[in-house]
Structure formats: structure tokens, C-alpha cells
Image (spheres, helix red, strand yellow):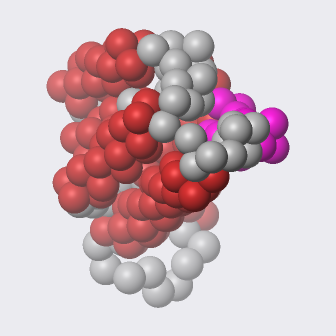
Amino acid sequence: MYIGFVMAFLLLFLICVFISLGVAVMASVSDVRGMIIPNRYTVYVIAAFALAYSVLHVGGHDHVFGNLLSHFLSAGLFLGVTFIMFLTGALGAGDSKLGTAYAFWFSLHDLPVYLFFMALFGGLLGVVSLGIRRWKPFDTAPEGSWVAQVQGGASKVPYGVAIGLGTLIAFFYAGYFDTALLGSFLTVKQG
């Protein structure tokens, strides 16, 4: 395979990874500002995964993601659990959809890391939320924002932030930034 193609595959993979992380930042900001995660963010994350997976599969770098079925099972499990949480009022629909989109990025092997760190950051945000509700430390919070709602007595957590932070750590754990993985793109014969 020509080195130019290999570098294009690597570049497209990294672009997809950084698009997904950029969406996590946008979703976090949107969630904090108005407790809303637009559906288009979910579409962007799924599209970035689909493109990354396809490009690496075509380029012969299947070792990056592994079995596609495992990724679909991760997303399906995540959606099933969070749908139940949504029905009970424990999680918002936007959180469920966005979290499911990110679950596509992880095989069943890597999914527990994503879930652990997402839950950890969600719990920390819950504690912060309780503190804000109790002590009302902000004099002027933008109307409709998470802080304003919590200071007004609502029990809410911008779980998009927890999803984004859990994703970032899980991306590192899954090896998407690992030098050995990235170097593997350069170990092909030049044509």
C-alpha cells in the first residue's frame, strides 16, 4: 500500500476522533447552558465512528477497532439501560442518545472503562449540583442554565459533561492516542 494512502487513513481516523471529542465539548457546553443536547451531536458522533471504522477497515487496520459486532453490542447495551433510566426519569433522552453514540466507539472490552468514568464524573457533578442547590453561590446565573435551575430547586445534572469526560478517558484507554497504534500505520511497505 502506498504511504500516501496510509497517511490519509491515519489522518481521517484522527480527524474522526477529534470531531467526536469536539462534539463532546459542544454537548457539554449546551447541557450546562440549557440542559439540552441537540440530536445533531449524536448524528455527528455516529457518523464520525462510521467513517473512522470504514476507513480503517478499507485500509487494513482492523486491529484498531476489532469486531464491528462488539461495537454494536456496546451501543445496544448502553441504549437499553439508558432507555430504562429515561423511562424512570433518571436520565434525559439527549444524554441517552449521546451516550449511546459514544458507546459505538468502544468494544465490549473497553465499554466498562467508559461506563466507569462516565458514572464517576456524573456522581461528582451530582455532588456539585447538591452543593449549588444548598448554598446558591451564584448571584446571577443565566436563565434556563443548569446553575439557575439547580439554584431554583431542581435536581438536575448536566450529564453531557460526564459523558464527554468519560469518553475522553476511554479514548485514551482504548488506545486511540497510543503511539504504538499510531505508529502501526507507518509499518506498511512503501509502494
From this view, report whether residue 154 is shown above or below residue 174: below
Q: What type of secondary structure mainly makes up the magenta span?
A: helix
Residue in view at x 22 percent, y 58 percent: 40
Residue 163: give x, y in percent of width and height: 49, 44
Seen at 31% across and 68% down, the residue is 34
Left/right placement of residue 36 relative to residue 165 reads left
Q: Is residue 135 above or below residue 101?
A: below
Quadrant housing residue 187:
top right
Q: Nearer the viewer, residue 180 or 153?
A: 180
- Left of 129 or right of it: where is 57? left
Is residue 87 one of those drawn in magenta? no
The residue positioned 52% from the left and 84% from the top of the image is 139
70 versus 152 height, above or below: above
Relative side of 120 to 15, left or right: right
Indicate whether 173 appears above or below 78.
Answer: below
Can residue 151 be seen in the rendering of this structure? no
Q: Residue furthest right?
A: 179
Q: Which quadrant of the figure has residue 109?
A: top right
Image location (x, y in percent) of residue 102: 42, 38
The N terminus, quarter of image: top right
**Residue 158 visible in the snapshot:** yes
State the residue at coordinates (39%, 19%): 68
Q: How many marks?
A: 0
Front-most of residues 173 and 89: 173
Look at the image and say whether residue 174 sits in the magenta stretch.
yes
What span is in magenta? 171-184
Q: Nearer the viewer, residue 88 or 39?
A: 39
Q: Position of residue 18 (x, y in %)?
A: 54, 59
Q: As drawn, which residue projects farthest toward the bottom?
A: 140
